């Protein structure tokens, strides 16, 4: 999937593939993603990772803008994408367990 659909890069561009390597990728309804980010921000390490950009431990949270097929105003996608370091998966699970 990564090799075939990079955003604005030629298919197979290593920059996109390398960026996503060793990351978990969740696609959720936008409201659920916002709720999850709120829950995860209770953890100080995850809050910092959610707040910073461009670092290996940073999260990437995106809600795409989609064009209309026949022109006109674009719209915000109903889903959001959360990409985060694989080593954060255990912390995420622990926060969710604590939240019940």
Image (spheres, rainbow, N blue to C red):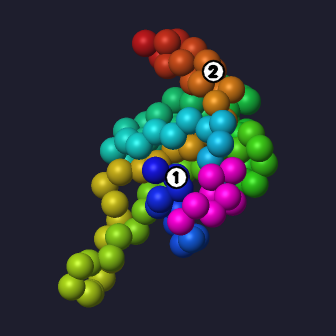
Residue 15 numbered tag: none
83 and 29: which is toward the camera: 83
The secondary element bearing badge 2 is classed as helix
Residue at left offset 40%, top offset 68%: 65
Residue picked out by circle 1 = 2
Q: Report crowding for label 1: few under 14, some 14 to 19, many 20 or more residues within 10 A (C-alpha).
A: some
- Determine the image quadrant of residue 12: bottom right
19 relative position to 74: left or right: right
Residue at left offset 69%, top offset 50%: 18
Task: Write down the region rendered in magenta.
Answer: 11-18
90 and 98: which is toward the camera: 90
Q: Report crowding for label 2: few under 14, some 14 to 19, many 20 or more residues within 10 A (C-alpha).
A: some
Horizontal and vertical percent for residue 92? 57, 24
46, above or below 53, in the image: above
Q: What number of labels is visible?
A: 2
Instruction: Examine the structure image and report whether residue 74 is included in the region drawn in magenta.
Output: no
Residue picked out by circle 2 = 91
Q: Earlier in the sequence, mark 2 or mark 1?
A: 1
Q: CA distance from mark 2 to mark 1?
A: 25 Å
39, above or below 80, in the image: above
């Amino acid at each position: 999937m990564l090799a075939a659909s990079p955003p604005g890069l030629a298919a197979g561009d290593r920059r996109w593939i390398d960026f996503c390597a060793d990351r978990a990728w969740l696609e959720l309804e936008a409201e659920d993603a916002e709720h999850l980010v709120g829950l995860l921000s209770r953890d100080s390490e995850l809050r910092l990772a959610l707040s910073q950009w461009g670092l290996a431990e940073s999260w990437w949270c995106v809600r795409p803008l989609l064009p209309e097929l026949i022109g006109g105003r674009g719209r915000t996608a109903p889903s959001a994408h959360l990409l985060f370091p694989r080593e954060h998966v255990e912390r995420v699970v622990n926060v969710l367990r604590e939240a019940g």
